[in-house]
Image (cartoon, grey):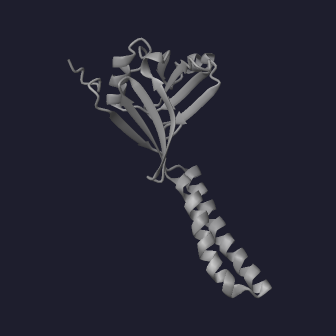
Amino acid sequence: MDSGFNSGGIPFECVVAQKKTAALMAKKAALVIIYILWAVVWLVVGAVTKLIAYLLALIPISLWVIIFFTWRYTKVQYEYSFFAGELTVSRILNDRFRKVLMTVQLRKMTAVLPVNSESKAEIERFGAEKTVFAASDESAEGLCVAMWTDEDSGERIRLYFEPDEKSRKILRYYNAAATMKMR
């Protein structure tokens, strides 16, 4: 019997993009200024050392390398993958680079709570040693926190994430006791 919540082997994925905040726009502006300053510094060095012809070839190549390794951090997305009772959280940079942040069995979660004034005391009381933030914004509507203790290391972990309605149903299906306070 298929429950409709991916117990039959079909994964469910949900992607949340980082919101465009003032801090993100300032970060992008700062990077553009750094790129311009990089080119200007090399032009000045080339003019002073009379190696401008050689540096004209070096500037675009070095600038491309710097942009390649830094600009990807301006577009961040988080993916929540549910498969066979597991939640895998990944960070995707610039739609190309994926890093798995964590994988957890849903039944191991001790609590999944909405982040609001009512649950703030319980979240703080948990006293996590490791906190992972994988949501669009700290004040996002529907922001939740999942808390559990890693069996291998004994480390208390807190995951802030932003589940959609189907993700909430999957969480309730696999761990109804932990999701009692989640609406």
Q: Quadrant of the N terminus?
A: top left
Residue 142 sits in quarter: top left
Q: Where in the figure is residue 30, as x and y percent of width and height?
A: 63, 60
Q: In the rendered view, would you say 16 is above or below 59?
A: above
Q: Nearer the viewer, residue 118 or 68?
A: 68
Which residue shows up at 79% across the image and 84% down it? 49
Q: In the rendered view, would you say 43 is above or below 118?
A: below
Q: Nearer the viewer, residue 134 or 97?
A: 97
Q: How many badges with numbers are in the image?
A: 0
| Residue sitting farthest toward the right | 48
Q: Where in the figure is residue 51, as x and y percent of width and height?
A: 73, 86
Which residue shows up at 53% across the image and 55% down it? 72
Q: Nearer the viewer, residue 111 or 55?
A: 55
Residue 123 sits in quarter: top right
Q: In the rendered view, would you say 152 is above or below 39?
A: above
- Left or right of residue 90, residue 65 in this image: right
Which residue shows up at 48% across the image and 25% down it? 104
| Residue sitting farthest toward the left | 1
Q: Where in the figure is residue 149, as x and y percent of width and height?
A: 56, 18
Q: Where in the figure is residue 32, as x and y percent of width and height?
A: 60, 65
Which residue shows up at 54% across the image and 22% down it? 117
Q: Quadrant of the C terminus?
A: top left
